[in-house]
Image (spheres, helix red, strand yellow):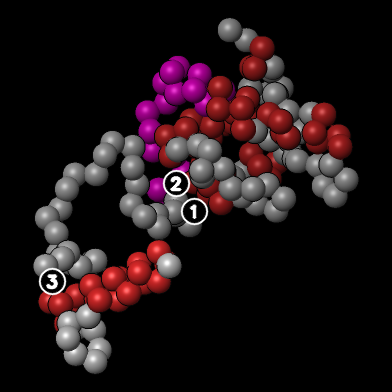
Amino acid sequence: MRLVVFVVVALAACDNGGTTPDWSRMITQPKVLPFGNTPMRTPPAGTIQRGWQADTTTDATAIIPVPITRELLERGRERFAIACAVCHGIHGDGDSPVAHAMQRRRPPSFAERKLVALTPGKMFDVVTNGYGLMPSYATLLDVRDRWAVVAFVRTLQHADGARLAREP
């Protein structure tokens, strides 16, 4: 009985006295429409434009666009250990327990010639979008952390076999 009373009251509240509801009130009510003109706000620090991708076809990605400092490399080492070392190994040599368990294709060593030849922009693109069996890490690593990982991997590549991950 309560349900019936509720339905009757609800329908009566919607009734404007006519045979159909007055939808014009919803159309003409004050509201903010999406994609309208709004004053530009300064984006928060560390954000990038939606849909932005590193341009891997120009020389602009031949360098890392953030200052390479000890702090950046330490951050890169930390993020590498969390996100990358599980498959690529702590030294970037493709030697890890997870890599040994992979049946289809093991992750490559960063010392391979074709990986050393990659531009930092292309490496950033691979971390951002994934490649082959490697997933995207865009949700795990923010833009600055991805560049930090790229800088650290470059350091591993130029270490000529030195075990930088063990060094202080």
Residue 157 horizontal/vertical position (percent): 63, 30
Residue 85 appears left or right of 106: left
- Checking the image for residue 15, the label placed there is none
Q: Nearer the viewer, residue 131 or 19?
A: 19
Does any portion of residue 5 appear in the rendered image? yes
Which is more toward the observer, 151 or 79? 79
The quarter of the image holding the N terminus is bottom left
Answer above or below: position of 142 versus 13.
above
Amino acid carrying mark 2 in the image: Thr
Q: Which residues are magenta?
A: 59-77
Q: Position of residue 52 (x, y in %)?
A: 39, 54
- In the rendered view, would you say 110 is above or below 156? below
The answer to whether the residue labelled 3 contacts the one labelled 2, judged by CB atoms less than 8 Å apart, is no
Question: Alpha-carbon neighbours of circle 3 within 10 Å: few (<14), some, or many (≥20)?
Answer: few
- At mark 2, the secondary structure is helix
How packed mark 2 is, by other alpha carbons closer than 10 Å (few <14, some 14-19, many 20 or more), is some
Q: Mark 1 touching mark 2, by CB under 8 A?
A: yes
Residue position for label 2: 61
Main secondary structure along the magenta-highlighted residues: helix
In the rendered view, would you say 101 is above or below 73? Answer: below
**Looking at the image, do the residues carrying marks 1 and 3 touch, with CB atoms under 8 Å apart?**
no
**Total tally of numbered discs in the picture:** 3
What whole-number distance in Å separates the C-alpha atoms at marks 1 and 3?
A: 48 Å
- The residue carrying mark 1 is 56
Dot 1 falls on a residue whose secondary structure is loop
In this view, the residue farthest toward the bottom is 19
